[in-house]
Amino acid sequence: MSRWVLLHKQHLRLRPEKYKRPFNGLFLRLCSSKLSQAQTDGSHSKSSKTGPVRIGCASGFWGDTATSVPQLIYGGNLDFLVLDYLSEITMSLLTAAKARSPTLGYTPDFVHAAVAPFINDIHRKGIRVVSNAGGVNPLACAAAIQEVIRKAGLDLRVAVVTGDDLMPHHERVPGERTPVRCSSASSSWRPNPSLSGRAPPIRRCLDLGADVVITGRCVDSALALGPLMHTVALAPDGGGQLSGDHADASFMSCGAQSTGGIFTDWQKVPDWDNVGFPVVECSSDGSFVLSKPPNTGGLVSFGTVAEQLVYEIGDPRRYLLPDVTCDFSQVTIQESGSVVGGDFHPSVCVDGGAVRVSGAKGAPPSCDYKVCATYMDGFRATAVCPVAGPHAAEKARRTAASIIKRMRRIFPQVGLQDFSRVNAQVLGAEDLYGAKACTEVTLWCGTAPPDWPGSGESIISGPAPRP
């Protein structure tokens, strides 16, 4: 198979004094004639929302379950629904898709599974949607959403944030590029660099009255921070308040991780099959309460929230984000309570638990952007071979070594070069973590479906019925 590779952790650092930040620009396209009015007279400058803001996250990665959308729409009492799709590997996959067709490069699940089946109820409930589903082709994603809205006979504004794609500017940044070692197969590589965008453009789209905001590459926390900046009028350098709102965004950006999805004490988490997705109710002081919709599985507790707080942040006193530098070292987590009239009541039990988080501090962001790029790097061949019997791990390693040795003996005979890289792992034999007590296994799951319309995958991950 062809392979697109991400230059992971080899980021371009673009300093604003040398390179103007491109992501502050935005492009709006609405399927409503009210667009031009919103742009010219500023009639949608602020939200009319008063009191706490409720935001639900329905996706933490591309391929996340679509059953999260109805539970949040019908049970989350939301102001905003956010969906995060873009990991580094996803950017590589979307880049490869766009290389095949200029109409691809976004996550179609967002259009067909998350929005289309529920667009009428999203509109009826006044829920505004923000997502980075645009991937490397946000305009095509917006066009697909516009078609969904048109077919539903609705009048909704769709906004697109652009500026993350650095290909039009690549000649201006060669001196800033970190040297990258590429294999011989990539002598003609063409990178597709993109930077992680910020929250202010999302806020601007909402200020202009957008009902759906679609971005390209965007830092996941900005998907929730943008709506908060819009509703509570946060300044871009809002210090501790902005840092607190980034904390709630961090709890949401990975979907059900904060509600027990990958909790270390997983035995304590009930009903994985119906795991609840996170809902945060945010106050103007930067504190928030995290919970999940009623009648769902999963768990919201001190442990699930504490683990998510430190997930992929590095130094908790200096968590670097494009909108703020967060200090989570003094955060307090208060378990078991609910929100009544905007006040937290720890004595009132909530279905599945609720946790109040406060005390985050912040400082202005650094002068750098994180930039990642994907490029074509030849081909990759993979194989999986079950090995059974006594001393299976040793037998599997010998099998892999023999196959590679045989192929290397054949290559010169047919005029092929040697492998550039080889990686053989015996899954389940602790090749990843060393000699520890069963910390890695491989799950093999197969089904024999009847004559379903389409594949089993589309049934499992496709649109969920209304509750």
Image (spheres, rainbow, N blue to C red):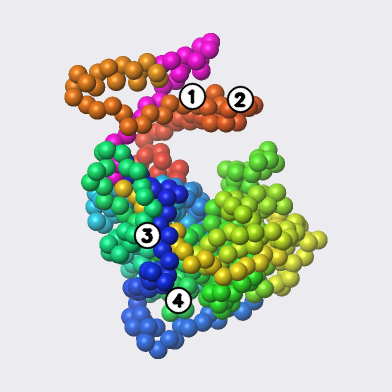
Residue designated by label 3: 176
Magenta segment includes 406? no
Quadrant showing the N terminus:
top left
Q: Quadrant of the C terminus?
A: bottom right
Q: What element does badge 4 sit on?
A: helix
| Kind of residue sitting beneath label 2 | Ala
Of residues 322 and 342, the one nearer the viewer is: 322
- 396 relative to 363 in the view: left or right: left
Residue at horizontal 42%, vertical 71%? 17
Q: Nearer the viewer, residue 427 or 413?
A: 413
Residue assigned mark 4: 204
Residue identifier under label 2? 435
Please say if the residues under marks 1 and 4 sit with CB atoms less than 8 Å apart: no
State the image coordinates of residue 233 (x, y, percent, origin top left).
56, 79
Residue pictured at 26% horizontal, 57% vertical: 103
Residue 86 can be seen, yes or no:
yes
> Of tags 1 and 2, which is closer to the observer?
2
- Around disc 4, counting alpha carbons within 10 Å, would you say few (fewer than 14), some (14 to 19), or many (20 or more)? many
Q: Which residues are magenta?
A: 376-399
Whether the residues at callouts 2 and 3 have beta carbons within 8 Å, the answer is no
Separation of residues labelled 3 and 1 (CA atoms): 40 Å
**The residue tagged with tag 1: helix, strand or loop?**
loop
Check the image and report above or below for 405 versus 203: above
N-terminal of the two: label 4 or label 3? 3
